[in-house]
Structure formats: C-alpha cells, structure tokens
Image (cartoon, rainbow, N blue to C red):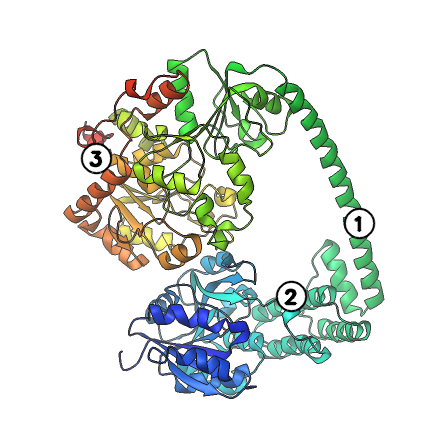
Amino acid sequence: MPETPELSVVVYGPNVQDHLPALLGPLAAQPPDGGVEVIVAAVGDWAREAAEEHAPAFTVLPLPDGAGDAAARAAGAARASGRWLHFVHAKDGLPAGAPRTIADRAASLPDTVDVLLFDHVRSTWRTSGLPSPDGPRLARAGDAALVLDDRAALLGLAPLLGNRAVRAAFWRDRERLLTTDDEPFAAQAALLLADRVACLSHAAYEVRALRRESLPPVPPERRHALVERYESLLDLAADRPAAYAVLYGLMVGDCLRTFARAGMPDDVAREFFRRASLAARHRRPDGHRRPPGLEGLRRSLLEEDACTEYRALQAANRTRRRVRSAVRTGRRRAGTLLRTAQYRRALAEPVDPHLAVFSAYWARGVACNPAAIAAELARLAPGVHPVWVVTAAGAALLPPGTDHVVPGTRRYWEVLARAKYLVNNVNFPDAVVKRPGTVHLQTHHGTPLKRMGLDQLPYPAAARGLDFQALLERVDKWDFSVSANSHSTRMWQRAYPSRHVSLDHGYPRNDVYYRAGAAEVRAVRERLGIAPGRRAVLYAPTHRDYEAGWTPRLDLAALADQLGEETILLVRAHYFYETAASPSSPLAGLRRAGRIIDVSSYDPVEELCLAADALVTDYSSIMFDYANLDRPIVIHADDWETYRTTRGVYFDLTAEAPGPVARTQRELADILTTDAWHDERAAKTRTAFRRRFCEYDDGRAAERVVRRVFLGEDERTLPPVLPIEERTPAPSPEEATAS
C-alpha cells in the first residue's frame, strides 16, 4: 500500500440486523487496490466479531455498545490516513468496485475540490439495487469542479454521507461542526462549507432502508429536530441566495411530507406544524413565490399556521382521489368486459391461414427481426397478409399502406384471435389464447449478455415487477424461437424452459449487413449529414435497471473535442427512454449539425450501424449485431462490476470483448485517438468474437425462417449457413466512398 492511500473507507456503527457481514465479505474477498484502505469503527461486540473475521484486510476499531454514529465516524476518521474519506454505515452496502471508482475519480480532482458527490442505489428488506432519482442531476452537473452556488440544485440530492466522499483535510478542519448524529445535517453542511464540489454519475453506494416496524418509535423531539436542522442549514447559507432558496424549498416540502405521512399523535402533529409554520414565515427568502395550484395552497396554509384547515384539505383530497379511482376502476372493468366478449366471439371464428400478426418492441412500430421476416414473407409468400400491432402514437410513422391495429381496439382482438401466425420480438399480452393450429414465433431482439427470463430470479433489481409464473405461461405458447448463435440457443433454453423449437437460422434483422452495398452505405451517411472522409463513431449504451432514467455516462462534448474535427459522434439512447429525443433530454444541449448527432429516434438502427466506422457501447446487444460488419468495436465498461452484480451476466465481457475495453473516459479517448481502436490486436479479438456470436448470421436468415415457419419446409432443405470465412459484409464507409 502507498504511504498515503487516496481513499479511506470508514465503515461505522453497530451490526444492525446482521447486515455488516454482507458489506465486509465482498470487500475482503476482492480487496481494493493499494490506493484504498478500510477502517471499521465497530460499535458493540456483534460488530466487532463480524469485523475481526476480516481483520487482516481491515483495520478494526472496537467501540462500546451505545456509541453514537458521530463518535464512530470520528474514531474512524482519526485513524484514517487517506486523502479522502468515505463514510459507510454498517447497515448499508457498497456496489462491487465502488471504492476503486471513487478513488480513481478523487485522484483526478484539483485540490480545491472538498466534496465528491456520486449516485447510489436503494434496498429494502424485500428489494435491492433500486435506482435513486439522483443520477440525472449528477450527470447534468458534468465532470468539472463546481462552486455550489452555481449548481445549488445539488443540495436536493439525498442527504447522506454515504453518497459523497470528503477531502480528509477539509473534514478535519470542520470536524467540530460536522460531528453530529444528525447525518443529513452533516451531509448538507459539508456541501455548504466546501470550497468546490465535483460529481460522479455512478452508483457507488447502497442505502439499505430497514423495516419501519423493526425500528424504535420516533420520539416527538426527533420530529421537531427536522425543523431545527433546516434552520441551522439556512443560517449557514444566509449570505448565499441560491443555496438559501433551494434549502428553503426543501425545508417546506420535507415538513409538509412529514406532517402528512409520519402518523404523529395529534398534540405532537400540531406542535410540529406550528414550528414548521414559524420557520416557513420567518425564513422565507425575499422575492420568494409560492408554486401555483394545490402545492401553493398547501404552503400558504403552512405559513398561516392553519393546521385545522390543512387537515380539511388533506381529507378533501383523499376523498377526491377515492372517487376518481372508483370511476377509473369502473371504466376499466366495463372496457375489459367488452373486450373480453369481443375476443371470445372472434375466437369462435375459424383460424385464418392467410393472416399473420406482427409486433416489435411492445408495439413501437415496424422494426427488428419481425420487420425483416415480414419483408421476406412478402417476397416468398405474398398470399399471407401481415397486420402490424402499433401504438396510436407510432401509427403516424408507419410506411404508407401498412395495415395495422392499435392495442385494445376491437379489430386488434379480432386479428389476434383469428391469425394463424403471431410474430413478436417480445411477448403478446397474457390474455392472448394459443389456439390449435396457430403458430407463435418468438424472434427475440438481441444476443443475451445480461441474464434473462428465469435467470433474473437471483437479481432483485432485474426481477422487480416480473411475474415469473405468467412469463412461463407466455413462453409455453411459443412454437419457435429464433437464435443467432449457439450461445443464444443454450441461454434461451435455460432462461425460457419449454417445448419450443429453436430456429438456429440467424437473426433476420442482420441480413442487411451482408446485403447492403456501397450505395446504401453512402446514402445513409448522406441522410445523416456525414461528409465523406469523416470518421463516424456510433455511441449506443444500454439500459441499467439501477438507474431511474437515461443520462450519458460520458462527457460527450469533451469527448467530441478530444476526438477532433474529423470525427462525428452518433449518440443513440436506449429505446426504453422515450424522452431521449425531447427538449429536456440530456442530449438537447449537445445537438448540433457538426460533431454530435442525436440519433436516438432514428430508425432503423441497422442503418446507423452501416453508417458508422466504429461502435462504442457498454453492455448493449448491438455489439453482437455490429460485429457482423467486421468493423472496430470499443467497450466502455465504467460500471461493469455494478452492472454484473445487479443485473447478472452470462459471461465476462471484459475478458471476452469484441475489441479494446476502456474503464474510464480518459482510456476511451486514448483508444480512439490512437491506433488501438483498429490495430491488429483489436482485429484479433473481434475475429474470435465474430466466430462465437455471428455464427448463423450470413444474410439469409429471414429466408430460412420464412421457409421453415410459413412454407413448412424441412430444415434439411433450407439454404445452409455460410461459413464465416466465406461471408462478405457490407463495405465500410471508407470502402463505400472509394468505390
């Protein structure tokens, strides 16, 4: 270990409900590198015993039962030798790799930065790894050192010591003020006292909320302490208008929520309301305006100390919500009964052997494998009529003449009841009946890196909201499952165990990568405004179950500057995030005609791949498809440990990548500004990746699927899969320009 570690992780507190071993075990099994030390300020014998099991890996400070959190933090900080301190409560957790991530970011910061803020995930007794709402705010703050007054909204982050690291010298200079058992006060005060702060849009902490029923009741003075905390913070921010205004808004909102939800006895509630009212009146900033509507009325009643009137407003709102809910429920029930009756009548009609229903991505439009199959069906079996399931919003974007139905309509249920063929890359609704003589074709929409189906069961963040029994009932309706490689075939069999037949024919959507010519490549680049000779890099990250929304994990403006004038960044958000192309999107401020192009709403994605000279992604299945083009791929795996732990994966991408792997933005820029992105080593790893994952993709996958499923041909008569050495991918942009 270096003489002075970069980071001291200070674990403190008692072993509440035996959560401490779950925190320390992974830290000991995969100890941080030499730049990180771990101090355990163990309160009580139970915590001491748990910590001493890992004593060679950690420094253990035994503290007596009853020692408060502030005393435990102070003891740990006094023993710590790192330049930065990260306080971790013994009941909480650390995502895999978090100490290293924090230490690396801290090492890059100037000495003027006193506090480093980062994202966190939340867990309860029944869920784990849930995303926090803080990620987008951290991403918008960027990577640069900030004066808090320029980004006062950061005071709205969860007030935890665990979601921030503090410079050790800064903490010790202000230890008298920050040493308190009121953790939210210490967290907010540290921000207010910091010279500058920096942000890391990365989940590096896990907050574990204990069952409320397992905790002792909150005494009245603890309720009143909320008001006192905010008044103390407002005193600290008295000469800082931006920070003061944010804190005032937080105080009023927190007080109203506490009054509404805490279940306090009447006398305690009225006294709490009175104190909150005094603070709201006396601390109100000059020029402050209440928000409009109901929220403004609530705040007005608080300022007037109108507790009785406020409770009457609460009761009226509860009544109104109940009435509205009853009306909505009645309408839904009536609509469900009507649709059920219509569907049952349609099920009594004969199956139409010339009708096929197609859907993709939860009825988003004509896309992916179903679209490629439908196109080939029109060529080989024009007598089969296709009908697409598309949302009302997506219908306006359909190609002219596309026959379609909107989910929930009468014709929607009629075609689902009568069609012989049902084709989807996800699943049709549970209510869809598998009729005798019908064929359900599951095409999937990617090669699985992340765990899928039943394999998600051990990963609560991924399994949240899933009904696995209902999933299996949907899977049992499949007749065929399309696969692009033997890896997928095996994973589908374990994730979706049923009697369906695997069609090892390749992904139809990937046929274009072998059928497109130079003219098609040039045409796509012209539509995107990419001049000949300029390098186009497609950045296509995936969805994360532990993030509330999509925010770029890269400083795209800085990356574009580093890559230079001759490189265009094509940025595509995951399709789960409908707002990526909206004016409030994180990309909104980066869209310009020059070096960054937001292609989040551009379809089909296969055209973007044809236009790109290289792909940068993290864990998206687009890498498996793009590999068919035999063009460079770079992996940006800045949170691999967190993703692998919370989502689950089928193989170690960092060890079996299709090209160079970058763990930081700096490493990514170095790869893309040198020959590393397309050198001999990159080509060698890509070749091995293509052999494994482009196994059945040769440009004739759609033909094989249509002949097998719709024409009923024997598998032995289908066009054989061409060996990978004999395939010719679409020309690269450089080749297309030269031809």
Amino acid tagged 1: Arg
Q: CA distance from mark 1 to mark 2?
A: 27 Å
Describe the element under mark 2 as helix, strand or loop: helix
Whole-percent x, y for residue 339 in the image:
68, 27
Describe the element under mark 1 as helix, strand or loop: helix
Amino acid tagged 3: Glu
Question: What residue sits right under mark 2 in the picture?
Answer: 249
Whole-percent x, y for residue 149 in the image:
51, 69
Question: Which residue in the rendered view is the most extreme toward the front?
Answer: 499
- Is tag 1's residue or tag 2's residue first in the polypeptide sequence? 2
- Residue nearer the viewer, 544 or 518: 544
Q: Residue at x 25, y 29 (%)?
A: 730
- Is tag 3's residue or tag 2's residue first in the polypeptide sequence? 2
Question: What residue sits right under mark 1 in the picture?
Answer: 320
Question: What residue sits right under mark 3 in the picture?
Answer: 734
- Is tag 1's residue or tag 3's residue first in the polypeptide sequence? 1
Q: CA distance from mark 1 to mark 3?
A: 64 Å
Whole-percent x, y for residue 373 in the image:
40, 23
Tell me: residue 64, above or below residue 196.
below
Q: Is residue 242 visible?
A: yes
Q: Residues within 10 Å of mark 1 (few under 14, many from 20)?
A: few
Of badges 1 and 3, nearer the viewer stands: 1
Q: Residues within 10 Å of mark 3 (few under 14, many from 20)?
A: some
Q: Residue at x 57, y 66 (%)?
A: 209
Please say if the residues under marks 1 and 3 sit with CB atoms less than 8 Å apart. Answer: no
Of badges 1 and 2, nearer the viewer stands: 1
Amino acid tagged 2: Gly
Q: Is residue 174 visible?
A: no
Q: CA distance from mark 3 to mark 2?
A: 56 Å
